[in-house]
Amino acid sequence: MTGPSADLYPAIEPFNSDFLPVSERHTLYYEQVGNPAGKPVVFLHGGPGGGLMPDYRRYFDPKKWHVILFDQRGCGHSRPFADIEDNTTWDLVADIEKLRTHLGLPQWAVFGGSWGSTLALSYAITHPDVCTDLFLRGIFLLRKKEIDWFYQEGCSRLFPDLWQSYLEPIAEDERDDLVAAYYRRLTSTDAAIRQRAAKAWSVWEGSTSRLLFDPASSDKFGNEQFADAFARIECHYFTNKGFFPNDNYLLDNADALKNIRTVIVHGRYDVICPVENAWQLHKALPRSELHIVADAGHSLSEPGITARMIEYTDKWSD
């Protein structure tokens, strides 16, 4: 491909990792990599419920950036695992701010994709004065039409073969509201019912995340432990409409972000979060920089998306 390099920075280990209690129930795992004296940035993973992966550390020049990454409530190494009690968007926004305060950082940049972009926008709208930059990818505004497109009808027409596997755990007379039907199974007291539903839900997303089908991505999403938290927490958030006061909350409040330097990167053929989302956010933030990657789907690891994100973390490392 032409343009920026899609090469990640070399693998790196944290210089610090620890746990931060954020409520009587929840304790977060977090880690710090790069240069402790560098420009701070917090990485917000996808899902909700996705958890961290080592490659997430590699989107930043370790000589210039102080990178903070954490597992959100209920996933990864955070405790308790797969727990949906006291687990809302606004709990996570408060957690991010507690982590910033705990580390003694007056400001930081925010990097998030997919659900991470939803959470980044929610945090920045609530705390605009502490956000120096927004690096946003695969924009997800968590509106009803977006949930319906991917989990009820729309994307199903592009992937009818994969969709069949997503439908299988759900009885035909419950398929008029698939998210609600999945929620009943993902919160069942029967472990076998939960596991079957969790795998089908997760594999549907993993199988459609890239421009070209990637069996490795599908396998990762089908891992029993990963799927348990990913599907349960994701469905919990979607059932509760993201815990937003209205369907268009993020766009309605985008004016709060007008003074934050923002880049928006989105794959042209993203079937999980259609590119319309990125366009509408860019129109609400006319000073933002928008890059639609011509040969990419949803995943952060798509070469064109990786290249653009690294281009901007390099450019804005001042």
Image: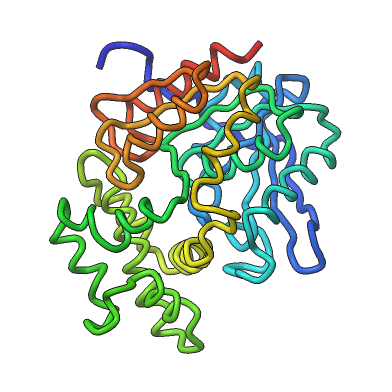
Q: Quadrant of the C terminus?
A: top right
Count of residue discs = 0
Taking 33 as reference, is 51 above or below it? below
Q: Quadrant of residue 105?
A: top right
Left or right? Give the position of 276 relative to 249: left
Residue 167 in percent (x, y) is at: 24, 72
Residue 210 in percent (x, y) is at: 28, 42
Residue farthest toward the bottom in the current orientation of the protein: 190
Task: Determine the residue positioned at 17% across, 54% down.
Answer: 159
Task: Determine the residue positioned at 82% across, 67% down.
Answer: 24
Q: Quadrant of residue 5?
A: top left
Left or right? Give the position of 234 relative to 36: left
Residue 294 in percent (x, y) is at: 25, 24
Left or right? Give the position of 187 relative to 38: left
Left or right? Give the position of 208 relative to 48: left
Task: Determine the residue positioned at 66% across, 37% down.
Answer: 125
Of residue 171 and residue 45, the one placed in the foreground of this image is 171
Residue 301 in percent (x, y) is at: 38, 35
Taking 187 as reference, is 253 above or below it? above
Task: Determine the residue positioned at 37% across, 77% down.
Answer: 181
Q: Quadrant of the N terminus?
A: top left
* Visual colour scheme: rainbow
